[in-house]
Image (cartoon, grey):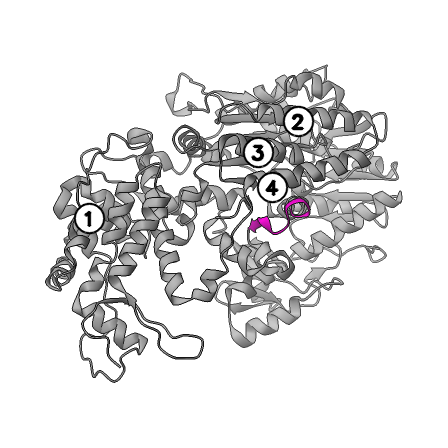
Amino acid sequence: MSTGNQPIAHAAKDGSGNWRDPHDLAEHLAGVTQLAALFAEKFGADWARLAGRWHDLGKYRQRFQNYIRRVSGYEADAHITGEAGKAPHSTAGALLACDRFGVLGRVLAYLIAGHHAGLSDWHNGLNERLQQSDSRAELEEAMAAKPPADILDHGEFQTDLKSVPGGSEGFALWVRMLFSCLVDADFLDTEAYMDPDKFSQRGTWPNITTLLGQFDLHMAALTAKAPPTPVNRLRAKILEQCRSKALEAPGLFSLTVPTGGGKTLSSMAFALEHAAKHDKRRVIYVIPYTSIIEQTADIFRIIFGESVIEHHSNAEVEPDRENSQSRLACENWDAPIVVTTNVQFFESLFAAKTSRCRKLHNIVDSIVVLDEAQLLPAEFLQPILDVLNLLTRHYGVTVVLSTATQPALSTREYFDARQNLHGLKYVREIVADPDDLYRKLERVNVRLPANWHTPTDWDTLAQDLARHDSALAIVNRRNDARELWQRMPEGTLHLSALMCGAHRSKVIRDIKARLKAGEPTRVVSTQLVEAGVDLDFPVVYRALAGLDSIAQAAGRCNREGTQERGEVVVFIAPKPAPPGLLRKGEDACRDVLHGVTGNPMDRALFARYFERLYHACDLDEQHIADLLKVDGQTLAVNFRSAAERFRLIRDEDNVPVIVFYQGADSEAEKWINVLRKDGPQRWLMRKLQRYTVNIHRRVAMALLAQSDIVEAIPGLYVQVSDWLYDPILGLNPDGMPPKPTSTIV
C-alpha cells in the first residue's frame, strides 16, 4: 500500500484493524490553526493561529515522513531505509519564527518548540536548543521538502507586544495561555483522526441558563422542606443577597459567611446568576482538600447530574463518579461545572507541562469560587494573588473568595519592602452586613486559656473531656492525637493522617451516625476535621493554633444551632505546633488574642491575625515572581524552573506506604496483588492512594531495615508486618500499644 509523496501527520487503523487514510499533514495544520485561533480569540488569536500553522513544520522533512511510516507500520512493505530512532519535528517552526521575526519570534518559539515536551526556560534551555546544528538541519530539511506556500506565508501578522494582557507583568501568563490554546487544539485535532470514537464522546454540555433553571428548581424544593428556624431564615437571606450581587460587573468578590451559613449553595447561586448575566462559560469550584471535595461535588451532582466533573486524584478511581465524557473533560475542563483542588488549579496556572497547561484557556471567561480562601498557602501567596489579578483584569474571570474567615489580601507596604504584599484590588463583599450576620449566627462561647504560656498536660485534658458524653478534641500533631487518645475512656475514636484515606472515611461515617443517633461520641483528631467535614458536637476542645483554625474548630460545635450555646475551649498543648507555618500561626494567634476580653471570634481580629501571619512569612518563598519576570531585551522567562518550584505539596522527605487496612470495604490486598503482577499503572496507583500513608523517609528506612515493609516498586513501600497498622490508630511505626479493650463500633 502506498500514499505517494503526500506528507502525513499521523497513521492509524480502524476498529477492524485496517489502515484508514492517513492524516494529511496540511489538513492537520489547518485544523490546529483554526482551533487554536478560536481558543485565543480574546487575547491573541493571530499568535495562536501562526503557532498552529507552524507547530508541525518539521514533519515535512523526509526523515520524519520515513519515520512515521516505518514506526506506524503503515508502509511496512515499502522497504524504506533511513536513520534509526525518532525524527524530531517541533524545532523547525520555532526556528523559522525566530528567523522571520527576530527576538519577538521567540514568543512563537516557546509555543512551538514546547508543544510536546512543555515550555522551557530560555537560558539553559530553548536558546541552546535553537542554536544546535541539528535544529538548523531540521528546518532546512523541512524547507527543502517545499511545504505549501500558504503554510509558510505569515500574511499580515504583526509581532506587536503592546497588547499583551497585563504588559510585562502579564507576559508569562499570556504565553502559557497561548500555549494552552495550541496544545489543546493539537490534542483535539489529532484525537479526531487517531481515535474518532473517543473524540465523539466529548460532551455537548447544557448551557448556563439550563443549569440555572435546574438550580432554581432544587432550591425551591429545598426551601419548601426546610423548617423555619432562625438559621434557615438567615441562610435564605444570604442566598438572596448572592443572587442580587451577581448582577454586578465581573471582577473580584468576597463571600464572608460563618460556618453553617450555607456558603456552598449560596456561592453557586452567585456563580450561575453571574454567568447568565455576563455570558460566562463555566463555574470552577476550587477546594483546598481532597477530603472535602467529594462531598461538595456530590451536592452539585444531585442538582446538575453529569454536567459536573471532578478533577482530583480520588475521582479517577471511583467508577461511579466518572463516565467517559467526564474523564475526557478533565483533560481540558470544557465542562460547565468543574470541581477541583487548590493543587490542581494553581499548579496548572504556573505549569510548563502540556497536560497541565492544556486546560488554561478554558479558565478564561469563567467564575472561579475559591472555597476556604483562608487556606491559600502563605509561601506562594504573592504569585497566587498576582495571577488572580491578571485573570480578573484581562481574561474575563470573576473570582469569589468564599470563607468564614477572610484573609487580609489587600496591598500592604512595610519599611522592609521585601515583606510588602501586592494584594487584590477592588474586592466587593457580597453579604450586605457581615458583622450583623456573624452576631446572628453566633452559636458558641469560646473560652481562652487563663495563662497563654502554661500548658495543659494530657492527663488533665483527658479528664476534662471525659466529663462530656460527646466531645471533639483537635490537636496539632499526629503524635499528640495518639498521646491524648491513650488516656481517653474506652470507645473514644481517633482521626489522623497516619490512617489511610479509606480508614478515615469509615471513622467519619461512624462519627456522623453516632451523633445523629444521639449516642455518646468522643473523638480525638488532628486538624483534618476542620475544613468541610460536617460534624456537630456540643463541646469542642482546640489546641492553640492559627485563629482561622480555631474558628474552623468552632464550626464543628453546635453547627445546626440545636443548643442555645455550644462550648469551645482553647488550651495550650504540652508541645508547641511544629516549626513552620503552623508555629507562625500559633504565635500570631497568641499575639492577637492575648488580653482580649470580648468575643475571640470578632471579625476585626481576623484581619489583624492574617496581617501578622503574613508579615512573619516569605510570601514568595520559591521566588516564582523573579523566575517569571520577562527580560524585555531577550524575552527570556524561566517557565520550567518556575513550574518545578511552584508545588503546593512537597513530599521530598516523605515516602508512601501501602497499608493493609482491614475495613469493611478494604480492597488494599487485592490491588497490591495486581501491582505485584502487572506493575504500576495510573488507574491502579490512584486506587492504592486510598490505602496509602505518607511517613518520613527516616522512619520508612528503619521499618525497611526491620523487614516491616518492603519496596514493591521504586519509591513505593508495602506493609508486611501484621502489627504495623492498628485498626484504630492507623500506621504504628513506633509500636505504641493500643488499649486492648478499645474498638470502633
Q: Earlier in the sequence, mark 3 or mark 4?
A: 4
Question: Disc 1 designates what residue?
Answer: 127
> How far apart, in angstroms, are the residues tagged by discs 4 and 1?
48 Å
- Against 635, is 509 above or below? below
Q: Earlier in the sequence, mark 1 or mark 3?
A: 1
x, y percent for residue 238? 68, 25
Which segment did they paint magenta? 301-311
On the question of residue 37 being in view, the answer is: yes
C-beta proximity under 8 Å, tags 3 and 2: no
Q: Residue at x 81, y 36 (%)?
A: 225
- For label 1, the crowd category at 10 Å Cα-Cα, with few meaning under 14, some 14 to 19 and many 20 or more, is some
Q: Residue at x 40, y 34 (%)?
A: 395
Q: What main secondary structure does the magenta stretch of the protein show?
A: helix
- For label 3, the crowd category at 10 Å Cα-Cα, with few meaning under 14, some 14 to 19 and many 20 or more, is many
Q: Which of label 3 and label 4 is nearer to you?
A: 4
Question: Disc 2 designates what residue?
Answer: 257
